[in-house]
């Protein structure tokens, strides 16, 4: 898990999310978390779609995937390290209330020591 803390990349190249400006901003914002390189950084990803090509109907499906970003690039985006945590179904895009749907997931991560 501490791969992101000790890998080397050339300047101006991004081969892993830890090379990006957003990761450096996170490191500066949460220095207590960064002290221990084995702390796990989890990312929630989603992308909605309309199942069964029913374009005339208003219905959508939004899978929420949890991915650990501490792994090396060859492992980081592999299927076995992506975890389907929930699927939001409904008549419209959940973008304005996705926090409500993800709150139980985030609480369970904190309660189990993640």
Image (cartoon, helix red, strand yellow):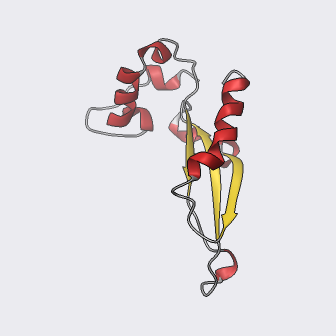
Does 32 sit left or right of 58 as displayed? left
Does 69 sit left or right of 111 as displayed? left
Can you see residue 45?
yes
The foreground one among 3 and 89 is 89
The foreground one among 70 and 64 is 64
- Whole-percent x and y of residue 95? 52, 57
The foreground one among 30 and 67 is 30
Place residue 112 in its image quadrant. top right
Place residue 15 in its image quadrant. top left
Report the residue at 64% width, 83% height from top: 57
Can you see residue 78?
no
- Whole-percent x and y of residue 61? 65, 66
The foreground one among 13 and 104 is 104
Which residue is most to the bottom?
56
Report the residue at 52% width, 24% height from top: 3
Which residue is most to the left?
12
Question: Does 56 appear above or below 60?
Answer: below
- Whole-percent x and y of residue 13? 31, 39
Classify the position of the N terminus by image quarter.
top right
Question: Does 28 appear above or below 69?
Answer: above
Report the residue at 26% width, 37% height from top: 12
The number of numbered badges drawn on the structure is 0
Question: Does 47 appear above or below 108?
Answer: below
């Amino acid at each position: 898990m501490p791969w992101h803390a000790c890998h080397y990349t050339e300047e101006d190249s991004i081969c892993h999310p830890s090379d990006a400006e957003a990761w450096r901003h996170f490191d500066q914002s949460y220095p207590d978390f960064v002290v221990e390189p084995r702390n796990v950084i989890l990312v929630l990803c989603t992308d909605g779609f309309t199942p069964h090509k029913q374009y005339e109907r208003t219905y959508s499906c939004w899978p929420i995937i949890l991915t650990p970003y501490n792994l090396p690039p060859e492992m980081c985006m592999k299927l076995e390290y992506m975890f389907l945590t929930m699927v939001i179904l409904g008549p419209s895009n959940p973008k304005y209330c996705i926090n409500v749907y993800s709150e139980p997931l985030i609480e369970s991560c904190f309660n189990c020591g993640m």
